[in-house]
Image: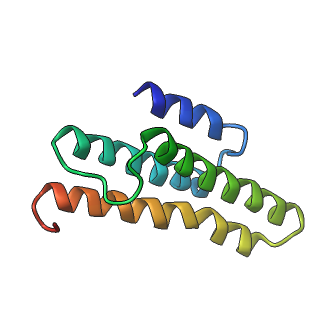
Amino acid sequence: MKRLAFALFLLAPAARADIFDASAIAGAAGDIVTTEVGLHRGYVEQNIQNRPLRIGMNVALTGTCLLAARHYEKEGHRGWARVLKLVPFAVFGGAAVKNLSTMRGGLR
């Protein structure tokens, strides 16, 4: 849990009070939490085995997308900014759903 709190702390400068920012961070946090729960239940991570690298990848992708979205907003491209904010939500939110499905026995 300390790692998750630290990861969210690293994302704080990139995020602003916006539902799209919140969804991006929630998707990344959901993936981290469901992966850790699955590992504690005995499941094996299929992609990145190294925990700090896996959490760092979530933070890096989410932070990069939020910073790029902020740049696009400043340039007046609000539509593209929203798309960039939804990328981490779609990628990591989908991974979290797959993790939950695997833990329930749906996917192996």
Describe residue 95's horizontal placement relative to residue 102 as left or right: right
Residue positioned most to the left: 105
Describe residue 102's horizontal placement relative to residue 62 as left or right: left
**Could you tell me residue 58's position as x and y percent?**
53, 50
Residue positioned most to the top: 2
Tell me the colour scheme of the image: rainbow
Task: Kindly indicate the quadrant of the structure image that contains residue 70.
Answer: bottom right
Residue positioned most to the right: 75
The residue at 25%/43% (across/down) is: 39
Residue positioned most to the front: 49
Quadrant of the frame with the N terminus: top left
Task: Kindly indicate the quadrant of the structure image that contains residue 50.
Answer: top left
**Could you tell me residue 71's position as x and y percent?**
83, 60
Quadrant of the frame with the C terminus: bottom left
How many numbered callouts?
0
The residue at 23%/56% (across/down) is: 100
* Up-down relation of residue 13 to residue 68 (above or below): above
Describe residue 72's horizontal placement relative to residue 95 as left or right: right
* Up-down relation of residue 7 to residue 16 (above or below): above
* Up-down relation of residue 94 to residue 45 (above or below): below
Describe residue 102's horizontal placement relative to residue 7 as left or right: left
**Could you tell me residue 107's position as x and y percent?**
17, 68
**Could you tell me residue 83's position as x and y percent?**
64, 72
- Front residue (pair 23, 103): 103
The residue at 55%/44% (across/down) is: 56
